[in-house]
Image (cartoon, rainbow, N blue to C red):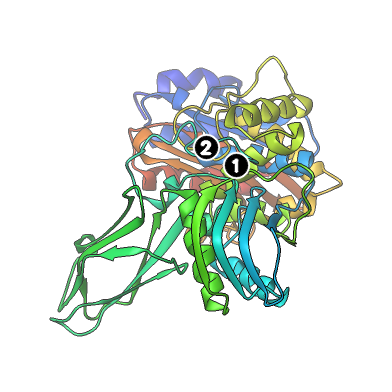
């Protein structure tokens, strides 16, 4: 604090009461560079900031970027937008056999294992008894790029790095379930969604005791098939563990899941898989409808799902332009949308993706306030926007935070974290005396630990809550 005091003292002399609280709390932290901290506080519907600390500074938003994506998507696409999936068949013979079938995806971010099973069951109900010859997979709703800007770990099999394609299943990831047995024997390995022709290699030993890092799961694509490598050990007294990993090839991942689901409902498949594009004007045999966009925004906010964010982001461009959705095109549209709600259009965010992955996005706390003001004031979707945020101490990414704070169950917030860059952000709203207040805290500082950043955020919000 002694090192910071000369820098902060002039601010204290001129600061408004709420500003002075922010200045004092920043000083207590001992951050060497106060420019790595930014904060804004405003009342919903008011153009003025109630508290301002580097509000116009440029920061990496990390997953706070999803606020821009969510509000822009509901405004541009509508909160009830349907990410449909269409099925095309050449013909069905008198016995219900289909020789060629094609599936076209329209960016459904929540096409899970359960839903692909339901799709297969619906096809059975429509009279399909078997599928032969060829399954065509149409991903042309997006362009062919599946790894977005900011996704800088191309060799990682972590699920949050999953490829993004217009037709994707289960977030293009697989859940590997490892259940211990008795010490000295192999653990039981299973996975979801069901995958036809998946190659599972390796074994896991059940030991009397084992550390968390003793279990290893990785995925790869060898050019012909998906491979899941599982090895190491798990403790006999442990609960079963589920580890999520990405599936590298979206076309093959969909085909494997679709084939397995059809087999499960009694539609035998003997098919080869090929990419294909459905001719414009073709009439689908069956259309599977998604959950509404507003439900996906909730998933995006509550659990900070990168895959959902990027699927929604690219869909903005695809729908707006009626062309293949791209990251660059979506970034331009969302940035232009922000210009329609900005309090100062001379300062605009830098947007490269919809999830906040990587170091390419930049914005200020005030810009986030502007975006949230738009969401809160919308006559079309403000209730859905408000309920999408995690609740402090109760659910989502805030379930374990603010648990002993007066703001537990009151404050809502979207987190944003990039550990390697010291990014620990939080933005959202809270209630006090019948009013709703918006806040944004940006910390782009490697000096402190993530826990220390959390404690600063909690103390700051507690102090402001008491002062209002």
- Residue nearer the viewer, 238 or 139: 139
Residue 439 rendering spot, x and y as whole percentages:
63, 40
- Picture quadrant where residue 141 is located: top right
Residue at image x 69%, y 34%? Answer: 317
Q: Of the numbered discs in the image, which one, if any, rests on residue 105? A: none
Number of disc labels: 2
**For the residue labelled by badge 1, is the local secondary structure a helix, a strand or a loop?**
helix
Residue under numbered circle 2: 356
Q: Residue furthest bottom?
A: 182
Mark 1–mark 2 Cα distance, whole angstroms, equals 7 Å
Q: Judge whether 217 appears above or below 332 on screen.
A: below
Which quadrant of the rendered structure holds the N terminus?
top left
- Picture quadrant where residue 165 is located: top right
- Picture quadrant where residue 366 is located: top right
Instruction: Evaluate if marks 1 and 2 touch, with contact meaning CB atoms under 8 Å apart.
Output: yes
Q: Is residue 86 left or right of residue 234?
A: right
**For the residue labelled by badge 2, is the local secondary structure a helix, a strand or a loop?**
loop
Q: Is residue 315 something one can see in this rendering?
A: yes
Q: Residue furthest front?
A: 94
Residue under numbered circle 1: 66
Q: Judge whether 186 appears above or below 34 on screen.
A: below
Residue 235 rendering spot, x and y as whole percentages:
21, 75
Q: Judge whether 245 appears above or below 164 on screen.
A: below
Would you call the spot at circle 2 few (<14 residues within 10 Å), some (14-19), or many (20 or more)?
many
Would you call the spot at circle 1 few (<14 residues within 10 Å), some (14-19), or many (20 or more)?
many
- Residue nearer the viewer, 303 or 121: 121
Residue at image x 30%, y 65%? Answer: 200
Q: Judge whether 194 appears above or below 374 on screen.
A: below
Residue 70 rendering spot, x and y as whole percentages:
67, 43
Q: Is residue 462 something one can see in this rendering?
A: no
Q: Is residue 109 left or right of residue 435?
A: left
């Amino acid at each position: 604090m002694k090192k910071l005091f000369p820098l902060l003292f002039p601010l204290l002399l001129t600061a408004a009461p709420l500003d002075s609280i922010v200045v004092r709390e920043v000083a207590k932290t001992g951050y060497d560079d106060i420019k790595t901290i930014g904060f804004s506080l405003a009342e919903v519907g008011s153009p003025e900031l109630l508290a301002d600390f580097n509000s116009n500074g440029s920061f990496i938003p990390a997953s706070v970027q999803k606020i821009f994506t969510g509000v822009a998507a509901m405004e541009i696409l509508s909160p009830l937008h349907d990410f449909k999936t269409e099925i095309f068949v050449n013909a069905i013979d008198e016995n219900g056999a289909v020789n060629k079938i094609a599936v076209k995806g329209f960016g459904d971010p929540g096409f899970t294992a359960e839903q692909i099973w339901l799709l297969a069951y619906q096809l059975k109900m429509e009279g399909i008894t078997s599928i032969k010859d060829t399954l065509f997979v149409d991903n042309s709703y997006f362009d062919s790029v599946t790894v977005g800007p900011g996704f800088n770990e191309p060799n990682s099999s972590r699920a949050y790095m999953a490829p993004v394609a217009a037709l994707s299943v289960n977030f293009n990831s697989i859940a590997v379930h490892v259940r211990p047995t008795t010490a000295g024997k192999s653990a039981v390995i299973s996975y979801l969604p069901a995958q036809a022709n998946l190659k599972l290699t390796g074994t896991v030993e059940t030991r009397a005791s084992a550390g968390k890092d003793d279990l290893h799961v990785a995925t790869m694509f060898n050019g012909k098939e998906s491979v899941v490598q599982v090895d190491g050990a798990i403790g006999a007294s442990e609960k079963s563990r589920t580890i999520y990993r990405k599936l590298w090839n979206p076309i093959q991942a969909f085909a494997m899941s679709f084939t397995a689901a059809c087999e499960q409902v009694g539609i035998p498949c003997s098919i080869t898989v090929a990419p294909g594009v459905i001719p414009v004007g073709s009439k689908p045999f069956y259309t599977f409808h998604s959950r509404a966009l507003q439900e996906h925004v909730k998933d995006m906010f509550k659990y900070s799902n990168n895959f959902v964010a990027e699927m929604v982001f690219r869909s903005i461009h695809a729908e707006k332009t009626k062309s293949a959705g791209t990251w660059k095109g979506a970034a331009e549209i969302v940035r232009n949308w922000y210009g329609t709600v900005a309090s100062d259009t001379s300062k605009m965010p830098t947007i490269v993706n919809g999830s906040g992955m990587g170091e390419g996005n930049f914005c200020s706390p005030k810009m986030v306030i502007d975006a949230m003001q738009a969401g809160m004031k919308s006559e079309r979707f403000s209730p859905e926007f408000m309920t999408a945020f995690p609740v402090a101490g109760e659910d989502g990414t805030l379930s374990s935070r603010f648990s002993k704070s007066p703001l537990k169950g009151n404050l809502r917030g979207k987190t944003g974290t990039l550990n390697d860059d010291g990014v620990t952000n939080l933005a959202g709203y809270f209630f006090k005396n019948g009013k709703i207040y918006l806040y944004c805290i940006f910390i782009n500082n490697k000096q402190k630990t993530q826990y220390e950043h959390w404690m600063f955020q909690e103390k700051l919000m507690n102090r402001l809550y008491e002062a209002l």
